[in-house]
Amino acid sequence: MIDVVIRSDQVVTSHGVGAYDVAVSGGKIAGVAAAGTFDGGSDVRVIDATGKVVIPGGIDPHVHCAWHVPNPDGTAGLSDPPPIVSKAAIHGGTTTVIDFARWTHGNTIRDTIETRDKTWVGQCYCDYSYHVMVEGTLPPDLPGQIAETVQAGYPTIKIFTTDIRPSTIGRMVRFGDIWEIFKILTENGGMGVIHAEDNDIVMHMYDKLIREGRTGFENMAEVHNVLSEDLSFRRVIRLAEQVGTALYMMHVSAASGVSAIREARAKDLPIYGETLHQYIMYTSEDYKRENGQIYHTYPSLKSREDQDALWTGTRDGSINTIATDELCCSLQRKVQGKRIDDTTGGNAAVEPRVSLMYTEMVERRNYSLGQFVDLVSTNAAKLMGLYPRKGVIAAGSDADIVILDPGLRRVLRADELHESDYSPWEGREMAVWPSLTMLRGKIVMENGAFLGDARDGIYLPRKISGEILAQACL
């Protein structure tokens, strides 16, 4: 029995954009057919979205909820939790997010996941999943745990090739340990999720700039620099090539990173790139603006030339997803660090991502609707092992559906959003805004009214397809 029919002249499906009816039944998409096919009886709600754009729910594959952020008084604190971030995500048309379960020494990965569940289960308005993060010198029994973890539906393992800051020593995984992890991932159908920077270069630049008295955060791009990205990307990709491991290179920020991915993909290696909307919209010059910390996330903003290379990468397949590195906190906490070695990463950015990218891609740069949907939803679903359950409007998929309305065009104001008291996108014009968000058949936001429940979101076990793991297929 059909519950809802969404009808529009611009429905973005796996077969193209057209005038379709999307029939929803029992939380799934029951069918997609020519507009007017499903008449609907007295018990069926027909939503006329003519003149609006109907897309699959957005997927943000890189968020951090309840993450470690110091309080202004220097005590330990956490960023905002799943209820706040996921509510903002729903308002903005994102229906699935992927966070991190951070393993630390003295724990098992199973314990790590169970602990993370306590933060998420019954406290999330959208669907969610985790990357499992490992760090530091790895104990001998961890590879076996990783194998079990991948087989249990947690196929993406996050690895740092740098400690990032002098105050966070212990994040970096040694190259030999990375080698061992890659072997396990290849054998068990997993993917490496990589924060790649060259630790020697990064720490050398911290020492150099501190010695020279150039400690202001506006110098961040000199520390987390283009050379670091070039060296680290090529080294880790070369290792993956030898082992046969698929990699998802997180927050690509420089032309050198794009080039390394492009060259690997030219060899048909399963190497995939993610950038952040901060990196393709802001440059290191924006650090010089008032409260310039609000534009920062690690590694760093780069030059206009690097930004142009990222945009090129979204067109030629070197960049496959656009994420946020979401870390929601107040403006006071975001700007409390003023040095190269204490600036807070991440951004309160999950809500405007879909509309912002539509504006920048479709309206201003003539991307097709299909290209736009690939970058904010479909590719993430495919890479992360969620497709075709998520990321597509097709029969049998979850009814995660968003209606983008050009009639809701607006200038973005932080006080109209739902997650923080600031926005790095303040004052930007949005060409569309969601008028409806549906999660597995339930309308959870309509015309600005929030209709969700914190128990709506469910954890999504994942399995990455053999095609994605074997070769560059996006």
Image (tube, rainbow, N blue to C red):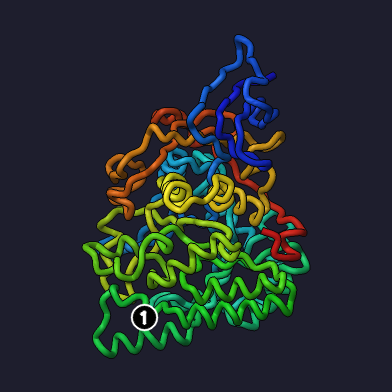
Q: Is residue 470 left or right of residue 4?
A: right
**Which residue is rendered at x = 73% and y = 74% of the image?**
183
247, above or below 94, in the image: below
Q: Position of residue 266 (x, y in %)?
A: 68, 72
How many neighbours does mark 1 have within 10 angstroms: few (below 14), some (14-19), or many (20 or more)? some
Q: Which residue is mark 1?
A: 222
Place residue 263 in its image quadrant.
bottom right
How many numbered discs, if any?
Answer: 1
Q: Report whether residue 185 is seen.
A: yes
Q: Residue furthest left?
A: 290
119, above or below 131, in the image: above
36, above or below 79, in the image: above
Q: Position of residue 172 (x, y in %)?
A: 52, 77
**Which residue is rendered at x = 51% and y = 64% of the image?**
312
Query: Quick one: quadrant of the C terminus?
Result: bottom right
**Which residue is rendered at x = 47% and y = 36% of the image?**
404
Q: Is residue 146 left or right of residue 291?
A: right
Q: Is residue 452 left or right of residue 112?
A: left
**Which residue is rendered at x = 58% and y = 40% of the image?**
56
Observer-nearest residue: 57 or 346? Answer: 57
Query: Quick one: quadrant of the N terminus?
Result: top right
Place residue 139 in its image quadrant.
bottom right
Q: Position of residue 178 (x, y in %)?
A: 64, 77
Observer-nearest residue: 10 or 280? Answer: 10
Q: Residue furthest front?
A: 366
458, above or below 473, in the image: above
Q: Position of residue 338 (x, y in %)?
A: 26, 70
- Amino acid at the residue labelled 1: Glu
Q: Report whether residue 106 is seen.
A: no
